[in-house]
Image: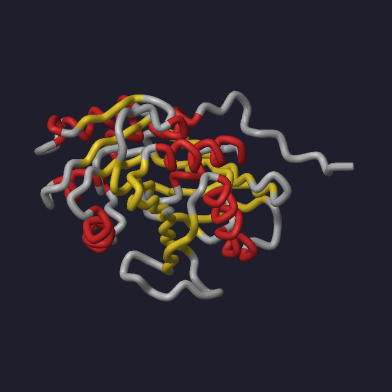
Amino acid sequence: MFAARLPLMDEYDPAQSFDEPVASRYDNAPRGDEEECVAFLADLAGEGPVLELAIGTGRIGLPLAATGVRVDGIDISQPMVDQLRAKPGGADLEVVIGDFAAVPVEGSYRLIYVVFNTLFNLITQDDQVRCFRNVAEHLTDDGVFVVEAFEPSYLVRFPHSEYVKAADVGTERVHLDVARIDPVAQLLEKTHVWLSAEGTRLNPVVLRYSWPSELDLMARMAGLQLHERFGGWRREPFTGKSELHVSVWGR
């Protein structure tokens, strides 16, 4: 008998995680790895073209396009894409609003990529498998698929299936992460909570995390194989202590 899983957040819609308030402040806190990420992707892109899944505000897509390669994008969130359009060069990118697992575009690409754990925004294994299969159909013969995602072993740092973490504590504002983990369904359900004199703001997110070996199997099912795996954009070795991986699959 299968163990009962924790109930998913009531009526959760992935678009909720990237609505207009989130989009308006999304670029306020750069991750700091943008330059290394763009250099890594540009090296694989060759003469392109390139497709970014979940292109969002163009944090990576726009500087990559500035290297001279054609970059197209897919995103579920119109507010995020509106932020991209407002930036220099943003009007020049071809972006489709839709489900990135479906890869609803025409043509083939030398490089298709998805960064910052966003593959896990596909909250079922079936959708992740579907994404790999559709990506494979849009790769050139020498094309590659790149995924950056966290390595789930870090979740064992939390001794219970539920936790509250103080992400930021200030004199006028507190930022908490309230989460629960279902290791059977491989679901991380989290709400970012901001408390201040102005009130309370909530930003929910649900991730269906996958292990690197599981992603490798999805790739094989799509006719792809692992070419390289690193512990970061600087091509650091991927080890048992790595908290994230950058994986490259191709034919």
- Looking at this view, is 124 or 5 the one in front? 124
Q: Is residue 82 visible?
A: yes
Q: Residue at x 39, y 25 (%)?
A: 98
Residue sitting nearer the eye, 88 or 226: 226
Q: Is residue 20 above or below residue 2?
A: above
Residue 110 placement (x, y as % from top left) = 29, 47
Q: Residue at x 37, y 38 (%)?
A: 138
The residue lying toward the viewer, choosing from 115 and 187, is: 115
Identify whether 43 is placed above or below 9: below
Evaluate whether residue 200 shows in this view. no
Whether residue 165 sits left or right of residue 162 in the image: it is left
- The image quarter in which residue 88 lies: top left
- Left or right: 45 as drawn, with respect to 114: left
Q: Residue at x 14, y 30 (%)?
A: 91
Judged from this view, the residue extending furthest toward the right is 1
Res 27 quadrant in image? top left
